[in-house]
Amino acid sequence: MPELPEVETIARQLRARGVEGQKIQSLKINWARIVEPLSVSAFSKQVCGTTISEISREGKWLMFSLGSGKTIMIHLRMAGSLSMVPGPHDRIILNLSDGLTLYYRDTRKFGRWKLVDDPQEILGKLGPDALTRRFTRKYFSEAMLSRHRPVKPLILDQSIVAGLGNIYADEALWESKIHPERRSDSLVDAELEKLFKAIKHVLRVGVENQGTSLGEGKTNYRDLEGESGRNRAEVKAYGRSGKPCDRCKTPLKKIVVAQRGTTFCPLCQTI
Ligand SMILES: [Zn+2]
C-alpha cells in the first residue's frame, strides 16, 4: 500500500518527467467510481483543456493543481499507481499536450480522484505531514499523552499525523523499541523522543530509496517508471514474522492491533 515515501517518489518523478505545465488534452475514465461523487462526464468536462500547473503531496495525497484553480486530489489507497506505459488495469488515461500519456492503474479499484475547489476540503482534516516542520516534537508528545490508546493506531491515524501506513508504522515502532500496543499516555519523554525521530527517519530513508516494494505481485508498489522501490533491504519488522530480529535475533511475532497485522520483536519492544 503506498504510503508517504511511495507517493513522494511518484510526485518527484512526475515533476522530473515534465508533467507540470502540461495541458490535459483528453482523458478516458474506465472506472466511474474513482471520480465519485462527480460523474465521468462532469469530471472530464472540468479537467479537459486545463493545465497541470503544479504537482505536490501532503500525507498520502498526490495533488495536481490545475490552471482552472481546481485541484485533482489522488489517493492511491491499496494498489493505485501511475505509469507512463499502458497496462491491463488502467482506470484513467490522461493525454497530455507534449505527447505524454499518463496511466492511472489500480487492480483493486479502491483509489480515488477527487476534484476540489480547495485542497483544504480534504487536507483540513489531516494532521501535519510527518516530514514537514509542522510535525513537531511538542505537537507529537501532546498528541500521544492526551490520548489513552495503543500507540500503533494513533500513529496510523491520518488526523493525528499524515503519511504513515502499516509498513512505516511497524518500522518506526521497531526502531524506537516500543510495543505497538503500548498505551500512548504511558510513554516517557525519552520514548516519545525516540519514536518521533524514528517516524521521521524511516520515512526519510523510504523516500531516499524511492519506496518499499515487498513482492512481485500485481498489487505491489511500482513507481512511475514501473520500478520497485529499493527500501525492502531496510525493512526490519514489517512482513518479517518468524524471522530473527535484526538486534537480538529473537523471532519476530505477528499480532493484530486495531485490525491491522502488526509485526514486532517480543523482546526488544517493551509494553
Ligand atoms: Zn529484538
Image (cartoon, grey):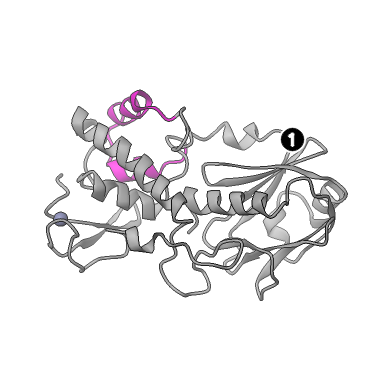
Q: Is residue 247 left or right of residue 222?
A: left
Q: Position of residue 128 (x, y in %)?
A: 48, 32
Q: Residue at x 18, y 56 (%)?
A: 265
Residue receiving disc 1: 117
Corner quadrant of residue 147: top left
Q: Residue at x 74, y 35 (%)?
A: 117
The answer to whether residue 180 shows anywhere in this view is no
The span picked out in magenta is: 135-158
**Quadrant containing ligand 1:** bottom left
Q: Is residue 215 above or below residue 126?
A: below
Q: Is residue 270 magenta-colored?
A: no
**How many labels sit on residues?**
1
Q: Secondary structure at mark 1?
A: loop
Q: Position of residue 58 (x, y in %)?
A: 55, 40
Q: Position of residue 85 (x, y in %)?
A: 69, 70
> What is the three-letter code of the residue carrying label 1?
Asp
Q: Residue at x 17, y 49 (%)?
A: 269
Pick the front one: 130 or 261: 130
Q: Position of residue 216 (x, y in %)?
A: 46, 75
Corner quadrant of residue 234: bottom left
Q: Is residue 154 magenta-colored?
A: yes
Callout 1 crowding tier (Cα within 10 Å): few <14, some 14–19, many ≥20: few
Q: Main secondary structure of the magenta part?
A: helix
